[in-house]
Image (spheres, rainbow, N blue to C red):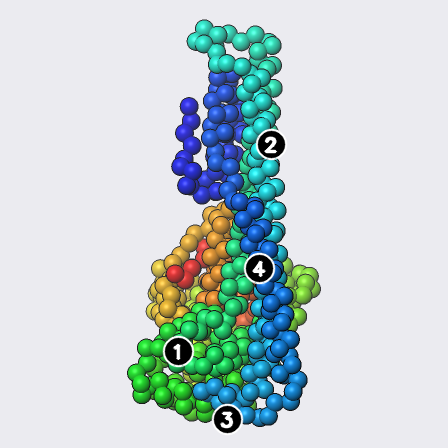
């Protein structure tokens, strides 16, 4: 009799086990073998989950929407009273700006409760449907077991007449179908759980003000820092401080000495706009000391918002960036935006000619999470330059430095996985507090299984390197954001675009590069 692994094993193990049983049933050579296989299938745990409990949580979430609506009405009344231009908080935030931020936060909270309830109700329905599907399969297995009757003895098993053969083959056929129903139930429940985890993780990451639990800033200061987006861009797609950065900045603020804490608060109060304050806290989250941050503020203070955005935020996401505009002749998305500084693309080799895709992806990822690093590249030693040619020289030099550190190939081509992991640990992990770990993806099932962790990482602001392969060899890119079932990908050819989860799972990653590089074969997960 076959042995089923521990019920604690993953759904992926159950799927493989049930698929194998279904095939074995069709090839079973005796009545006793069919009965054994039916028992094996019945020993597989049913899809877990209590639909009633999940629906109860959804009802609880939905019940909060009305309470949040009352808060919104109160905030809205305050906002319409024409507040005077007074300062609040420790960092000199305008009261009018604070009320606007509070209004947006309350709206987002209401949307989060509503969306959370919808996610849970969808999950409850999917779990219920999967369990009913599983019960149907088990019922058919029990029916076939009854039809076959008791086990054959030794001599009975030696000979099988035509009627007995027909009964065995018929039972094997229907039992295989029943196991397929159970397999579908496990698969559906697994996918529904993955999607729910993705959406709830995203909602949790968007509960931004609560990520800062430091006692050194007022509630108003925390709210404004969490609310601030890149100047001149869609704020919800371009927050300056990601969820994990808010947490790290908060933790580091609490560890500062009294003198450093006071210096940090003075810098925040001195800032001319919310963006300047947010970049200072982003620098703190990236691990810079107060003296470095003070020097950094001296370089950006008084600059107009467009200058600050261009110098400190390499990737800005357009509001229409997820529109489906079809594919170009090479299989890439038509809706692809260039990542540029004053017209010069953030591209490998400065013009796309070199094979430094790993190092180039790492440089851009590092600039996304560390504003001081970004300014060194865009603004030069004094942080004041605005010259695309000088930027290109510094960009390529930094790509070459990391390529050498990762022991990349000669003539600026290729890098092994150990080098790729090492430079991501040093250049990106040093700022995000992460240690990157390679995970190979050998099948669509592997890619589907890793999605939850990939999406949780990027929702928190931790870029995830992804390697793709195909007829053109191999290429390194980076997953940098997630919205719904879409993943935003930075390609070191100097562009960003969105691909779907289905594209990632089923070998259509060429939409982010070209059709000759379709398959994601590894990711590097920040732990």
Residue designated by label 4: 61
Q: Is residue 200 left or right of residue 325?
A: left
Residue designated by label 1: 215
If you read the primary sequence from the N terminus, does the residue marked by circle 4 or circle 2 appear first?
4
Q: Which mark is residue 461?
A: none
If you read the primary sequence from the N terminus, does the residue marked by circle 2 or circle 3 appear first?
2
Q: Nearer the viewer, residue 152 or 91?
A: 91
**Residue 60: x %, y % from top left:** 57, 57
Count the marks: 4
- Mark 2, other Cα within 10 Å: few <14 / some 14–19 / many ≥20: some
Query: How far apart in space, not on screen, are marks 1 and 4 (Cα)?
Result: 29 Å
Residue at 55% over, 24% down? 142
**Residue 94: x %, y % from top left:** 54, 88
**Residue 175: x %, y % from top left:** 57, 25
Mark 3 or mark 1: which is in front?
A: 1
If you read the primary sequence from the N terminus, does the residue marked by circle 1 or circle 4 appear first?
4
Residue at 58% over, 48% down? 124
Quarter where residue 141 is shown: top right
Mark 2 or mark 3: which is in front?
A: 2
Residue at 61% over, 51% down? 122
Q: Nearer the viewer, residue 274 or 49?
A: 49
- Image height check: is 484 above or below 234? above
Residue designated by label 3: 302
- Mark 1, other Cα within 10 Å: few <14 / some 14–19 / many ≥20: few
Query: How far apart in space, not on screen, are marks 4 and 2 (Cα)?
Result: 32 Å
Query: How far apart in space, not on screen, are marks 4 and 3 (Cα)?
Result: 44 Å
Residue designated by label 2: 136
- Mark 4, other Cα within 10 Å: few <14 / some 14–19 / many ≥20: some
């Amino acid at each position: 009799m076959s042995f089923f692994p521990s019920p604690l094993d993953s759904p992926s193990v159950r799927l493989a086990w049930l698929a194998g049983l279904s095939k074995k049933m069709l090839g079973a050579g005796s009545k006793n073998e069919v009965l054994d296989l039916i028992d094996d299938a019945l020993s597989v745990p049913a899809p877990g989950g209590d639909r009633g409990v999940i629906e109860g949580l959804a009802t609880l979430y939905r019940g909060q929407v009305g309470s949040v609506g009352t808060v919104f009405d109160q905030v809205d009344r305050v906002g319409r009273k024409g507040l005077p231009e007074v300062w609040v908080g420790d960092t000199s935030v305008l009261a009018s700006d604070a009320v606007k931020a509070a209004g947006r936060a309350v709206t987002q909270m209401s949307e989060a409760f509503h969306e959370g309830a919808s996610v849970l109700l969808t999950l409850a329905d999917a779990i219920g449907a999967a369990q009913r599907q599983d019960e149907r399969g088990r019922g058919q297995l029990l029916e076939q077991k009854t039809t076959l009757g008791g086990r054959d003895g030794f001599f009975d098993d030696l000979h099988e007449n035509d009627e007995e053969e027909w009964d065995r083959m018929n039972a094997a056929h229907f039992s295989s179908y029943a196991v397929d129903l159970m397999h579908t139930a496990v698969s559906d429940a697994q996918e529904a759980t993955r999607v729910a985890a993705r959406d709830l993780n995203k909602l949790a990451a968007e509960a931004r003000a609560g990520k800062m639990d430091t006692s050194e800033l007022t509630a108003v200061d925390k709210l404004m820092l969490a609310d601030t987006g890149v100047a001149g861009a869609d704020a919800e797609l371009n927050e300056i401080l990601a969820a994990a950065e808010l947490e790290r900045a908060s933790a580091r603020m609490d560890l500062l000495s009294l003198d450093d804490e006071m210096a940090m608060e003075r810098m925040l109060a001195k800032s001319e706009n919310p963006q300047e304050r947010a970049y200072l806290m982003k620098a703190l989250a990236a691990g810079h000391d107060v003296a470095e941050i003070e020097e950094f503020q001296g370089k950006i203070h008084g600059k107009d918002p467009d200058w600050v955005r261009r110098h400190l935020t390499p990737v800005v996401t357009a509001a229409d960036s997820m529109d489906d505009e079809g594919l170009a002749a090479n299989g890439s998305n038509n809706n692809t935006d260039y990542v540029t500084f004053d017209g010069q693309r953030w591209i490998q080799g400065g013009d796309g000619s070199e094979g430094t895709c790993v190092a180039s992806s790492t440089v851009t990822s590092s600039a996304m999470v560390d504003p001081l690093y970004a300014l060194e590249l865009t603004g030069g030693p004094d942080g004041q330059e605005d010259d695309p040619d000088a930027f290109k020289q510094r960009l390529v030099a930094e790509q070459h430095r990391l390529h050498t550190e990762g022991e990349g190939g000669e003539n600026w081509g290729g890098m092994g996985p150990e080098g790729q992991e090492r430079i991501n640990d040093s250049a990106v992990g040093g700022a995000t507090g992460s240690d990157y770990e390679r995970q190979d993806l050998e099948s669509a099932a592997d890619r589907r299984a890793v999605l939850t962790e990939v999406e949780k990482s990027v929702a928190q602001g931790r870029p995830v390197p992804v390697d793709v392969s195909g007829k053109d060899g191999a290429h390194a890119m980076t997953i940098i954001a997630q919205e719904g079932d879409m993943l935003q990908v930075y390609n070191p050819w100097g562009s960003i675009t969105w691909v779907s989860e289905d594209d990632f799972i089923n070998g259509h990653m060429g939409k982010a590069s070209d059709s000759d590089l379709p398959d994601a074969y590894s990711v590097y997960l920040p732990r």
